[in-house]
Amino acid sequence: MSSILHGRARRFGDDVNTDYIISSTRKKETIDESILKRYLLETVDPAFAESVQPGDVLVAGRNFGCGSAMEVAATVILAAGIKAVIAQTFSRTFYRNAVNNGLLPIECDTSEIAEGDSIIVETRGRGVRVLDRTNSSERDGSMPSGIAAEILSSGGLVPYLRERRSFTR
């Protein structure tokens, strides 16, 4: 899987849980991500969803996506036009939900990336390079490998299974 993403960094801190990503009160009304995207991260920043531009990249600290294992947290991020999340670490369940839905989870040092920085993400195989054009820095990261990388390159688990009709390679 090789690709290049260009986007604006949208910065968050540590322990962004799935209820911050999309509030439980919003999921009582619907789980349609095309509607829920209007409420993305509203608990943390009420104006965030309205300010998202397609191609933005979420950047966070440690333990992104902790909390409950709801898949809709990953699908709402994608519905908002965000194709990648860069974090120091991810909750394992969020990481897997991201892969299964085609949202690219990248682990790397995010300490020097600020809100609004111009980011380029280059993926080649399992390797990832994150370039911050605003502060002229770059860092290596990691992304899923093996079958998880294959699932991502298919666009998620459902497209992967449609193509292959099984989990075998």
Image (cartoon, rainbow, N blue to C red):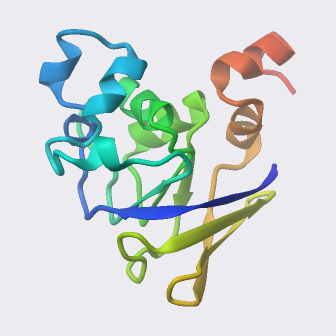
Residue 103 x, y percent position in the rendering: 56, 40
Q: State which quadrant residue 155 falls in.
A: top right
Q: Is residue 69 visible?
A: no
* 132, above or below 1, in the image: below
Rendered residue at 43%/37% (across/down): 77
Residue 43 image position (x, y, % from top left): 14, 43
Left or right: residue 138 compared with residue 92: right
Q: Choose between 62 and 21: the one closer to the eye.
A: 21
At a point 20% along the width and 35% down the height, the residue shown is 19
Residue at image location 25% in from the left, 51% down from the top = 16
Question: Residue 134 at what x, y percent from top left?
Answer: 51, 83
Q: Quadrant of residue 116?
A: bottom left
Is 83 situated above or below 69? below
Q: Residue at x 35, y 70 (%)?
A: 115
In the depicted structure, whether residue 24 falls above or below residue 89: above
Q: Is residue 12 above or below residue 129?
A: above
